[in-house]
Amino acid sequence: MPLLVMKFGGTSVADLARIKNAAEKVRREVERGYDVIVIVSAMSGKTNELVGWVEQTSPLFDAREYDAVVASGENVTAGLMALTLQEMDVPARSWQGWQVPINTTSAHSAARFVSIPRDNIGAKFAEGMKVAVVAGFQGISAEGRITTLGRGGSDTTAVAFAAAFGAERCDIYTDVDGVYTTDPRITSKARKLDRIAYEEMLELASLGAKVLQTRSVELAMRFKVRLRVLSSFEDTDENSGTLVCDEDEIMESKVVSGVAYSRDEAKMTLLSVEDRPGIAAAIFGPLADAGVNVDMIVQNISEKTEGGKSIAVTDMTFSCPVNQVLRARKAMEDARAADIIRYADLIEDTEVAKVSVVGIGMRSHAGVAAAMFKALAAENVNIKVIATSEIKISVLIDRKYMELAVQALHHTFGLDQAA
Ligand code: ADP
Ligand code: ASP
Ligand code: MG
């Protein structure tokens, strides 16, 4: 039997009526002759609520218990989806991660797949079951503890199942009808893309476009999974949505294909750290150990005199998600107390956002950075940190200018929808 993976995100299973609507889409594919693996997220808002409960109970929580709590949202929707399908006379049953089992590493709250054996689900398909409903976002570690894959992780569950079971396609049903040139919530001028290259999608996702989890795109690229994003609220067919595919399947290509943003960033600066070999390791080692995801890094060279003697000191700036500031500060204070690092002061700016432009065309076009900085200058937006790679340029700016910056860049790089 040909097999499809269909993933429904939080808003697509937000209540019983929406679960029913999603189940109808599944039934249609079964009627077309497919066996289907359905991956479900928790009902919209549920995971946030669970995370909130954990943080209120224990600010520097034990990640294993965090996972035990936040994985539960998907269990509810998996069971409800299976029941809904059964009510429609579609033979279906649910699986939680550990039942498959979805084997992962023990990196709690950021676990990665180790293996997904096909035996259990395969045996049920062989017996005539048509739909396996699997709880997204979760797995089980070698130690037998429940793990989760990081926010948005059900996308990655879906792609992993598509790869493991050799699915014809992996369809990600969500509340937008595809991947856009930027988040359509930020500008109504955003344009839907029919196709986007894996590499560009990977950059957009990792720079904040949460329509797909970064790891899901990585896996799709590695295992050549045909990945599609489409609306769960509209009628859809084989041509709907956006296909994420190889670069050479795409005809038209602009220098910049998309603008991404990440709202909740923080910038931290260590003032007057010694400028000596090993200082970066002494700072970023403890941050990594504390689980802080450091993103951009800038080191300034400066001189300081102490007792008439000139000594080399520098300021080290880095950015990280704003909800990791507490952890980052503690890691730095502990390292200072243990005399691993010395610094004059630690300055935090928790009101910043990151805005990025992405495009494969940048490889062969000069001047994108200059055009970007000019567009931001014209809007009087001050740039605090810059980072570049082969196909992207990112800037850290004041959060209050984020929307303005996205809109200006979208316009500057010719992405606005024709009026
Ligand atoms: P789900 O709950 O289905 O997983 P998400 O909320 O995780 O859905 O992702 C869908 C959202 O991603 C959209 O509602 C949209 O606001 C946002 N988004 C951000 N960037 C983009 C983009 N470039 N194209 C489409 N959607 C985007
Ligand atoms: N429910 C999880 C989250 O909100 C996983 C997902 O929806 O993909 O992050
Ligand atoms: Mg999502």
Image (cartoon, helix red, strand yellow):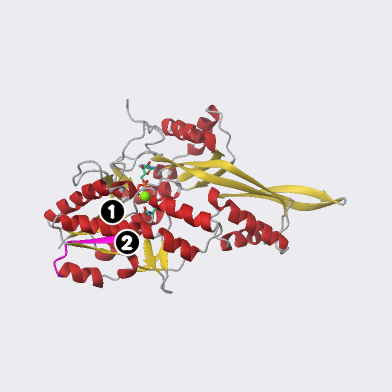
- How far apart are the alpha carbons under marks 1 and 2? 12 Å
Residue 129 lies in the magenta stretch = yes
* Magenta residues, start to end: 127-135
Of the pair 133 and 405, the residue shown nearer to us: 133
**SS of the residue at dot 2?**
helix
Residue shown at the point (22%, 47%) measured from the top left: 21
* Residue pictured at 41% horizontal, 61% vertical: 148
Left/right of residue 340 with respect to residue 356 in the rendered view: right
Q: Residue furthest right?
A: 308
Secondary structure at badge 1 equals strand
Answer whether residue 108 is visible to the viewer in this image: no
Q: Is residue 77 above or below residue 257?
A: below
| Type of amino acid at the residue the image marks with label 2 | Ala
Q: Which mark is residue 7?
A: 1
Name the residue type under label 1.
Lys
Question: Does the magenta portion include 142?
Answer: no
**Residue 412: quarter of image:** top left
Q: Quadrant of the C terminus?
A: top left
Judge from the rendering whether residue 17 lies leftward or rightward of residue 289; answer left or right.
left
- Which one is in front, 57 or 5? 57
Q: Is mark 1 within 8 Å of ligand 1?
A: yes
> Which residue is under mark 2?
160
